[in-house]
Image: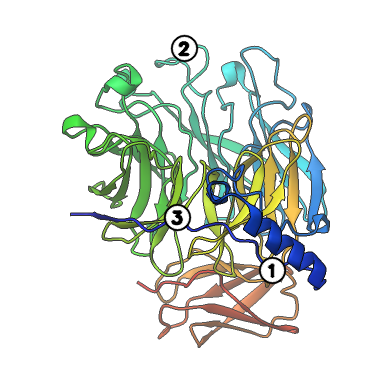
């Protein structure tokens, strides 16, 4: 049986100040000590802001601000492309937003220097058959194209007449969009509707995702309309529902699923907001073939909001009230308390986790120490943050005053390389993303040398060498060696 291991909430402590002034440090220590004990509780600290050192604002930089013409607001995490630019979506706006039934939205890229380019405007087709309203971001496919979902739009002949039930799409870096699938294409929306989480590409090359509603099993939580599905879809648009939630008595398998992630074992993991033995959400595993296992049922009031798998093999995530670690076997440990962060956590190359709440950018150590990096005076950070291969953190806000922005948080984190895919057999083609790769002299897979081709300053193509084993991919550049941010798995 899964076990819950509770530990005392970790008090939020002031990290060492960036200044060496003894008087300043004494002031900070005395301020922390003088606080009432109750106000040291992480949930109360207006989400971890009091008694924390907020680093120099010089670390923060606005890259670009949005408006209704460019699309607004950017609600989702960004993703780095082969060209080194960051790609993302906006919820509405763009050239086809009429302010009525067509809300539009865009796909864009932005350079790390802050040059914004809109590559697609949604609702370009009649009745927004190409989709509208992007709640979530894109993922970079192994083929170099981007894949995503829209929450509405698509074929309106099903159960979402006039608005559409959402789509799955592919878009090239140049902006050529192909609608792969429109939801509610089956009777009673048995294939799901309203996808509100990003896709993930499996080891088999297919894409996997979730719909918040719909499915084969009606449930009271959605007014009888279905509690959500998990699906896979090929690059050519063949869709298969692999699980409909609330398929077990009392919805013990959960309902209303969130973001899926690909585990190191090739299976997928995720959470549901409701259902489970306490109707407070679940943590589950599902195979690519659709065999679902409920690993953990959350306690009342939890309502999980997503997980990631960290370098130690455990899963880390958030609920409405606390941060947790959970083993693959289902032993959960609460590591800190705090209110519902936006999006998933990010584990950066320093081993710490980063994320956002309504007005806070924070850092969380694996042991549970929370630090406020920035408190936003206007606007709400959305979708969490990503770390580009240059080591810098990038994020989005919904309203930095008006229509949203992209910002960067300068860190002392080292540059790294990223592989696509992260798992493949010997002889398979692999793309390596990075920065300042010109002049690279060697590539290795866990110490085994590989032949490679330098495509550009941000891209290398290579082949998994025979005899290589699971481990770190390294690239030797003129200034040193860059390592992959996650271990490359050899099946």
> Percent from the top left, x then y, of residue 454?
68, 74
Residue at the spot of label 2: 161
Relative height, residue 107 to residue 202 (above, below): above
- Contact check, label 1 and label 3, Cβ < 8 Å: no
Residue at the spot of label 3: 9
Task: Look at the image and tell me in which quarter the N terminus lies.
Answer: bottom left
Measured in 3D between alpha carbons, the distance from the residue under mark 2 to the one under mark 3, in whole angstroms, is 48 Å
Element at label 3: loop
> Percent from the top left, x then y, of residue 481?
65, 83
Query: Could one spot residue 416 in this view of the protein?
Result: yes
| Picture quadrant where residue 350 is located | bottom right
Q: Is residue 219 left or right of residue 60?
A: left
Element at label 2: loop
Which of the labelled discs sits on residue 16, or is there none? 1
Q: Which residue does the image show at 30% across and 28% down from the upper left?
A: 215
Relative height, residue 326 to residue 63 (above, below): below
> Percent from the top left, x then y, of residue 364?
55, 59
Few, some or many residues within 10 Å of mark 1 (<14, 14–19, 20+):
few
Query: Who is closer to the viewer here, 473 or 466?
Result: 473
Q: Which is closer to the viewer, label 2 or label 3?
A: 3
Q: Which residue does the image show at 53% across and 40% down from the upper left?
A: 148
């Amino acid at each position: 049986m899964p076990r819950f291991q509770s530990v005392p909430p970790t008090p939020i402590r002031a990290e060492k100040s960036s200044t060496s002034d003894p008087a300043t440090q004494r002031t900070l220590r005395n301020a922390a000590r003088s606080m009432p004990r109750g106000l040291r509780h992480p949930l109360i600290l207006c989400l971890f802001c009091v008694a924390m050192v907020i680093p120099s604002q010089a670390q923060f930089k606005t890259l670009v601000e949005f408006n209704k013409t460019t699309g607004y607001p950017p609600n989702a995490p960004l993703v780095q492309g082969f060209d080194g630019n960051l790609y993302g979506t906006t919820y509405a706006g763009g050239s086809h937003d009429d302010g009525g039934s067509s809300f539009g939205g865009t796909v864009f890229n932005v350079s790390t220097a802050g040059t914004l380019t809109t590559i697609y405007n949604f609702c370009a087709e009649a009745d927004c058959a190409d989709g509208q309203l992007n709640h979530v971001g894109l993922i970079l496919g192994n083929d170099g194209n981007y894949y995503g979902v829209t929450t509405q739009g698509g074929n309106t002949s099903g159960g979402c007449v006039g608005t559409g039930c959402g789509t799955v799409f592919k878009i090239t870096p140049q902006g050529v969009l192909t609608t792969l699938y429109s939801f509610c294409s089956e009777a009673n929306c048995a294939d799901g509707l309203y996808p509100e989480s990003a896709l993930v590409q499996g080891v088999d090359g297919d894409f996997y995702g979730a719909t918040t509603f719909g499915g084969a099993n009606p449930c009271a939580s959605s007014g009888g309309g279905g509690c959500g599905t998990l699906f896979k879809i090929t690059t050519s648009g063949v869709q298969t529902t692999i699980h409909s939630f609330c398929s077990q008595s009392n919805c013990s398998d959960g309902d209303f699923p969130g973001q899926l992630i690909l585990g190191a074992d090739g299976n997928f993991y995720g959470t549901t907001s409701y259902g489970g033995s306490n109707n407070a959400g679940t943590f589950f595993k599902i195979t690519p073939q659709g065999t679902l296992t409920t690993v953990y049922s959350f306690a009342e009031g939890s309502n999980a909001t997503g997980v990631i798998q960290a370098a130690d093999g455990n899963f880390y995530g958030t609920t409405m009230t606390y941060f947790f670690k959970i083993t693959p076997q289902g032993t959960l440990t609460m590591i800190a308390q705090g209110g519902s962060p936006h999006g998933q956590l990010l584990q950066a190359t320093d081993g710490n986790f980063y994320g956002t709440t309504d007005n806070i950018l924070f850092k969380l150590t694996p042991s549970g120490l929370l630090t406020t990096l920035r408190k936003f005076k206007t606007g709400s950070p959305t979708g969490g943050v990503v770390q580009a291969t240059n080591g810098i953190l990038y994020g989005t806000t919904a309203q930095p005053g008006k229509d949203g922005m992209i910002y960067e948080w300068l860190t002392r984190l080292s540059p790294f390389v990223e592989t696509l895919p992260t798992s493949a057999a010997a002889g398979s083609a692999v793309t390596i993303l990075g920065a300042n790769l010109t002049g690279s002299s060697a590539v290795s897979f866990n110490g085994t040398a590989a032949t490679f081709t330098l495509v550009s300053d941000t891209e290398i193509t290579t082949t998994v060498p025979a005899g290589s084993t699971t481990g770190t991919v390294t690239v030797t550049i003129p200034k040193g060696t860059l390592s992959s941010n996650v271990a490359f798995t050899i099946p």
